[in-house]
C-alpha cells in the first residue's frame, strides 16, 4: 500500500470478518444478500394511498429488483397505478386486494 501511496486508518478497518453491511447490502462468503433491516422496512410499509407514497415504495422496493425473481411482473400493477389514465376506482380495487388476508 505504501508503494502506491495508499493509506488507511486502522480504527476504521475490519479484518477477518465473515459478514459485513455495505451500501444497503449484506456481504457474506456466499455472496451479496439483501440487508435484513431494509427487507423488514419493505414488508412493514403501509399500503400506499397516494401517487407520492406509491412512488416512494416502488423506489425502495426497486433497489432490490435483482434479488426478486420476476420483480417487473410483480410490480407491474403498481406501476400501472402511476399512469395518468389510472382512475380512483382502480386504486380502491387494488387497496381492497391488499387488505384481504
Image (cartoon, rainbow, N blue to C red):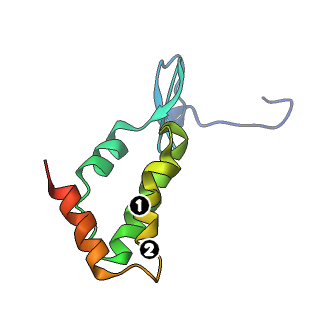
Provide residue 88's location: percent of width, then percent of height: 29, 81
User: How many discs appear?
Assistant: 2
Provide residue 51's location: percent of width, then percent of height: 37, 76
Can residue 64 be seen here?
A: no
Question: Measuring 48% from the left and 31% from the top, which residue is drawn there?
Answer: 33
Against 75, residue 91 (above or below) is below
Q: Which residue is mark 1?
A: 77
Q: Secondary structure at mark 1?
A: helix
Q: Secondary structure at mark 2?
A: loop
Q: Earlier in the sequence, mark 1 or mark 2?
A: 1
**Of marks 1 and 2, the one in the foreground:** 1
Against 41, residue 7 (above or below) is above
State the residue lying farthest toward the left: 101
Please report contact status of discs 1 and 2: CB closer than 8 Å, yes or no.
no
Which dot marks residue 23? none
State the residue lying farthest toward the right: 3
Q: Which residue is mark 2?
A: 82
- Looking at the image, residue 79 sits to the left or right of residue 47; the answer is right
Amino acid at each position: 500500500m505504501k508503494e502506491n501511496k495508499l493509506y488507511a486508518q486502522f480504527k476504521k478497518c475490519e479484518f477477518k470478518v465473515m459478514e459485513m453491511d455495505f451500501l444497503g447490502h449484506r456481504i457474506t462468503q456466499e455472496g451479496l444478500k439483501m440487508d435484513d433491516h431494509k427487507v423488514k422496512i419493505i414488508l412493514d410499509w403501509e399500503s400506499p394511498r397516494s401517487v407520492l407514497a406509491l412512488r416512494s415504495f416502488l423506489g425502495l422496493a426497486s433497489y432490490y429488483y435483482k434479488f426478486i425473481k420476476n420483480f417487473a411482473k410483480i410490480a407491474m400493477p403498481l406501476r400501472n397505478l402511476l399512469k395518468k389514465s389510472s382512475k380512483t376506482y382502480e386504486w380502491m380495487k387494488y387497496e381492497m386486494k391488499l387488505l384481504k388476508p
